[in-house]
Image: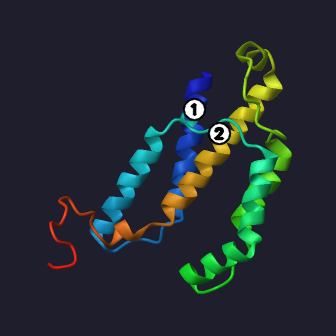
Amino acid sequence: MPASQDKVSSEDKLLEDFQGFFIEETDPQIAEKRKEVLKTLRENDVESFPSDLTVITAFDEALQCFSIGGQVRNYYRYGTYSLCEAAREKMWFAFKNGAITNHQETDVDAVANNPKELQRRKTVQEYYKQKLMEKKMKGSSEDIWDKRKTLLKNPFKE
C-alpha cells in the first residue's frame, strides 16, 4: 500500500472517530452543518498546519491562562475558573515535541536531511490538526444560529 493511501486512510479513520463523538442529532439542520464541518476538515491537509511549536510559547500561554487576567476572563465567559487543561496539555506536548526557541532562519537542506526533525515537524502538524478537529466537533453557535448574509443598515435601531 502506498504511503499516501495509508496517510489518507489513517486521517479518514481519525475523522470517523471524531464523528463518533457526536450525539445522534435529531435535528437535520444541525446534522447537515456538522457534515459540512467534517467535509472542511477532510479538505485540510496536514501540511497546511504550523510545523513548529516552541516550549517558550507554550509556557507563555499556560502562564497567561493561570494568571489573574486569564482566570477573570474565564470566569466572565463561562462562570467558573479554569484549570487550563488545554494550555497544560500543549505545554507538555511542546516539552516532548517542540523546539526550545523559534529559529528565525530555517535551513531547508538541514531540515530535509534530518529525518528526526521532519518527524517532529509532522507530529506538531498532526497535533494542530487534531486540536482543530476537537474544537470543531464540539460544535458552535452556528449549529443553531445562521450566519447573517447581509449587514444591517442601522443595527441598533431596527
Residue visible at 81% across and 39% down?
101
Q: Quadrant of residue 62?
A: bottom right
SS for dot 1? helix
Q: Please name the residue shown 37% across and 55% down the image.
A: 35
Q: How many marks?
A: 2
> Foreground: 9 or 57?
57
Amino acid on which the number 2 mark rests in the picture: Gln
Q: Quadrant of the C terminus?
A: bottom left
What residue is shown at x 81% (from left), y 47% (from top)? 55
Picture disc at residue 47: 1
**Placement of 150 over or under 11, stated as above or below:** below
Percent position of residue 61, x then y: 72, 59
Q: Is mark 2 in CB contact (under 8 Å) with mark 1?
A: yes
Q: Which residue is mark 2?
A: 125
Compared across the picture, whether 97 is left or right of 38 comes to: right
Question: The residue under label 1 is which amino acid type?
Answer: Glu
In the picture provided, is 125 more to the left or to the right than 146? right
- Image quadrant of residue 17? bottom right
